[in-house]
Amino acid sequence: MWWAKTALQGLPIRTKIERKRKRNPKVHRKLPKMKRLKSIVMLALISFGILTACSSNALHSESISIAGQAWKQGVKKEFNIPVKDTSLLYDVVLTVRTTSEYPYCNLWMYLTVDGPLGKSKRFPLEITIADSKGQWMGEKSGSTVAFSKVITHDRFPKKGVYRFSFEQASTDKVLPEVMDLTLELFAKEK
């Protein structure tokens, strides 16, 4: 091939695209515009997908992070949820996020609900983290696993603010690898 370099040095070598542009100058102008248009359309579609995926129809949503990803016994995480319409049926959904290093297959906690009627209810609540084979039951993304559970599917008896308090109920003094709790209120159709 050494002879090709020396013999063909003076001859111009053109690629296929250069030959097309040479024959039809309009092709030269259209290619970048088409690429730009495709890029804009793709960006718009991706943006729309992200916005619709991240939007929620929750009437109320609140998150509380666990300091140092270690939930200490006796530390309560409280959420205040305003209820304005007592005729609606509501779902209250708790989402717990842990790391993939969470050491247990479940998470026990106490839930206390205080309402505007002055009554308080306390009951145990279990979030199943993994099945008997050790497979995560929640949605895993990287090293984060999210578990959601409907804790109430009912009507609220009176308008006002309802306080939901969560307290870890394990035998450990500190429950490791718990990142945060999110409580959401959804209205169901009548």
Image (cartoon, rainbow, N blue to C red):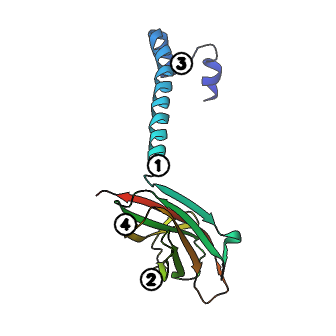
Which residue is outermost to the front?
Answer: 117
Q: Residue at x 57, y 66 (%)?
A: 79
| Figure check: 166 above or below 146 | below
Residue 63 on image: x %, y %: 58, 62
Lower sequence index among marks 3 and 4: 3
Tell me the SS state at disc 3: loop
Which label lies toward us, 1 or 2?
1
Q: Name the amino acid type tagged 4.
A: Arg
- Along the viewing direction, whichever of 149 and 115 lies nearer the viewer: 115
Which residue is outermost to the left?
Answer: 190
Q: Is residue 54 left or right of residue 88?
A: right
Residue 115 visible in the shown view: yes
Q: Residues within 10 Å of mark 1 (few under 14, many from 20)?
A: few
Residue 40 on image: x %, y %: 49, 29
Which label lies toward us, 4 or 2?
4
Q: Name the amino acid type tagged 3.
A: Arg
Q: Which residue is mark 4?
A: 155
Lower sequence index among marks 2 and 3: 3
Lower sequence index among marks 1 and 2: 1
Measured Cα–Cα span from mark 4 to mark 2: 37 Å
Measured Cα–Cα span from mark 3 to mark 4: 75 Å
Q: Name the amino acid type tagged 2.
A: Lys
Q: Which residue is mark 2?
A: 133
Residue 73 on image: x %, y %: 65, 83
Q: Which residue is mark 3?
A: 14
Q: Which residue is mark 1?
A: 55
- Along the viewing direction, whichever of 2 and 174 lies nearer the viewer: 174
